[in-house]
Image: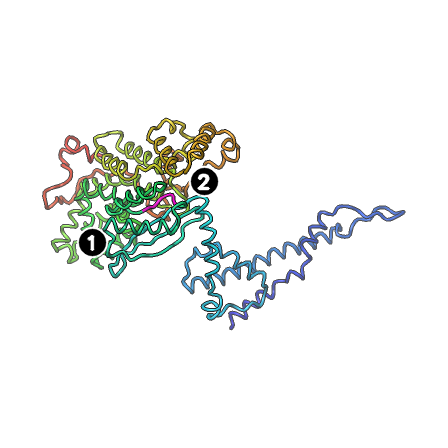
């Protein structure tokens, strides 16, 4: 009660707007410079122009603005305290429905009684009409511009295989239905029938593509769908393709590094005392940073290991570790050997040089706000260029990695829709006119037109308009259209601008990125020997340190 009384007193001290001269009148008086003429006498100035009156009005106006700011500060403070107390996420203030809510409260004025529990839970829980209205606007856009069905499979705590079906269009994604596919999720024919059901439900004429993961049954079902529906594409999920590519790199070329990192990480996090010791040496920093895909998480964890390398080495050579019971255990000794093993850190640098550009492409394509379809070609090319530069153009060091990338690209990632999106992206096309000489891209573009556009007359019309697009004629050449070329791209920030050629130097990571957290300089990799004389117990170090330059250029980074 005391708090309410104090708040009331604070607000009561602030003059009401009615007690202050009307602001519109003040502005009119300030702008009114005319003089009133009196017959037979000299002109008499309007009383509002009198210096004393003007000073008073300016003072009242300034006081009003200052008091208004005080009221807002008090109101926002109370609102924020409610958010903290209720544990509501901060991003609720970004919702489209938030601003109309505040405006409605403002229009009501003082004395509004807060909504009751019953009102919120029962009386006003009538969202069906609003939802149907929203869905109707989405459906109208789907019929006009086309849409995409997305099948997102996952496993719940009861080990059931559930598939969420969503429809994506110009206004965003809409959830359709969740299906329990535990009994047939690995059977191609069953998945084909299930996907066909949703094509008919959404409307075949409205469909552009269906996106699923890259499971073998989904690939087969996708091909069957394209045969049944001649104007529809099946497209594998790009994020899943890139995660599989990272898995190939880890398991085929860096299997031992991956196993050692898992062993060290598991050992530390399964022993609370060792975990506490690690946090003490790393400044309360953790080694694990989760991401939206499994191997992006693995990559990020290795990156954190690299950043904390000096602190981890200090920990396992410290008195505190030596005096602990863990240093006497066989597994503890093995973990210490790995941490102090030079090849472990050197191979980690190799992973970062290869994986860093690829995970940034993954971050770009995982954007949920804008479609990155037109940037997949360009981003993959730039990722490969970044890997090449990181190895000083020494093809021997990255040839096997490029073979894995090309294999995934040719089999799964290279799709006509991606090629067409690349050509029709104004930012990409007008910055590189050689695109129209790229056979792969042009073939994908014309294949897409032939498959998606019904009717030869319409296909011919689009082909003719492409010539205006290429030459930036008509609407494409207007100043407004030229300015918009770079404004309709996906959400680009400092962590992935390099993918579109916007940065000349290395990128800068920030703490809020989905995949990245700390910036590292791979060129500063230390070359010092292990001072404590540890050697791999399995006698199979990844690098022969005595003949490093001659025998192991693969890891000479």
**Place of residue 139 in the rendered image (x, y in percent of width and height, measured from the top left):** 44, 50
Q: How is this picture coloured?
A: rainbow
Q: Quadrant of the C terminus?
A: top left
Q: Answer whether residue 78 is magenta in the image.
A: no
Disc 2 marks which residue?
488
**Place of residue 488 in the rendered image (x, y in percent of width and height, measured from the top left):** 45, 40
The one nearer the camera, 397 or 162, is 162
- Side (left or right) of 481 relative to 149: right
- Side (left or right) of 246 relative to 441: left
Disc 1 marks which residue?
266
Q: Secondary structure at mark 2?
A: loop
- Side (left or right) of 123 relative to 262: right
Q: Does residue 355 appear in the picture of this structure?
A: yes
The residue positioned farthest toward the right in the image shown: 40
The one nearer the camera, 321 or 542, is 542
Q: Bounds of the magenta span?
A: 207-211
Q: Does residue 308 appear in the picture of this structure?
A: no
**Place of residue 3 in the rendered image (x, y in percent of width and height, measured from the top left):** 51, 69
Q: Residue at x 63, y 57 (%)?
A: 64
Q: Answer whether residue 210 is magenta in the image.
A: yes
As measured in the structure, the alpha-carbon distance from the residue carrying label 2 to the one carrying label 1 is 44 Å
């Amino acid at each position: 009660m005391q708090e309410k009384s104090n708040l009331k007193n604070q607000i009561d001290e602030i003059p009401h707007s009615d007690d202050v001269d009307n602001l519109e009148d003040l502005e009119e008086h300030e702008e009114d410079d005319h003089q009133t003429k009196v017959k037979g006498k000299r002109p008499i100035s309007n009383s509002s122009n009198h210096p004393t009156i003007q000073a008073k009005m300016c003072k009242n106006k300034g006081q009003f603005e200052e008091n208004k700011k005080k009221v807002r500060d008090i109101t926002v403070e109370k609102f924020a305290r409610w958010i903290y107390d209720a544990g509501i996420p901060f991003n609720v203030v970004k919702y489209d429905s938030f601003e109309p809510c505040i405006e409605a409260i403002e229009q009501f004025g003082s004395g509004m009684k807060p909504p009751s529990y019953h009102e919120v839970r029962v009386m006003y829980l009538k969202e069906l009409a609003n939802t149907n209205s929203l869905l109707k606007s989405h459906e109208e856009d789907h019929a006009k511009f086309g849409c995409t069905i997305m099948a997102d499979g996952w496993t719940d705590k009861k080990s059931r295989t559930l598939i969420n079906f969503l429809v994506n269009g110009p206004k965003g994604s809409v959830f359709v239905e969740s299906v329990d596919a535990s009994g047939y999720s690995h059977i191609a024919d069953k998945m084909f029938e299930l996907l066909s059901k949703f094509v008919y439900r959404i409307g075949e004429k409205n469909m552009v593509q269906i996106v699923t993961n890259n499971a073998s049954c989904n690939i087969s079902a996708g091909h069957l769908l394209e045969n049944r529906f001649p104007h529809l594409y099946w497209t594998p999920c790009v994020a899943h393709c890139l995660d599989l590519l990272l898995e190939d790199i880890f398991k085929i070329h860096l299997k031992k590094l991956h196993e050692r990192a898992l062993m060290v990480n598991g050992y530390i996090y399964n022993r609370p005392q060792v975990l506490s010791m690690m946090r003490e040496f790393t400044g309360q920093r953790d080694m694990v940073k989760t991401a939206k895909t499994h191997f992006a998480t693995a990559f990020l964890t290795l990156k954190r290991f690299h950043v904390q390398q000096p602190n981890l080495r200090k920990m396992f050579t410290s008195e505190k570790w030596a005096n602990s019971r863990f240093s006497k255990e066989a597994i503890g000794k093995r973990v210490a050997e790995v941490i102090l093993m030079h090849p472990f850190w050197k191979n980690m640098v190799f992973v970062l040089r290869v994986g860093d550009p690829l995970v940034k492409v993954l971050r770009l394509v995982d954007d949920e706000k804008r479609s990155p379809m037109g940037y997949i070609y360009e981003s993959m090319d730039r990722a490969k260029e970044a890997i090449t530069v990181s190895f000083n153009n020494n093809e021997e060091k990255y040839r096997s990695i490029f073979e894995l990338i090309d294999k995934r690209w040719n089999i799964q990632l290279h799709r006509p829709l991606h090629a067409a999106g690349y050509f029709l992206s104004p930012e990409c096309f007008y910055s590189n006119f050689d695109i129209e000489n790229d056979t792969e891209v042009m073939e994908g573009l014309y294949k897409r037109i032939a498959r998606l556009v019904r009717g030869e007359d319409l296909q011919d019309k689009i082909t003719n308009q492409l010539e205006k697009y290429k030459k930036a004629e008509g609407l494409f050449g207007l100043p407004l259209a030229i300015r918009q070329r770079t404004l309709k791209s996906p959400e680009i920030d400092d962590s992935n601008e390099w993918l579109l050629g916007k940065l000349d130097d290395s990128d800068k990571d920030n703490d809020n990125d989905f995949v990245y957290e700390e910036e590292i300089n791979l060129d500063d990799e230390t070359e010092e020997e292990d001072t404590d004389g540890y050697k791999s117990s399995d006698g199979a170090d990844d690098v022969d340190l005595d003949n490093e330059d001659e025998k192991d250029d693969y890891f000479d980074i």
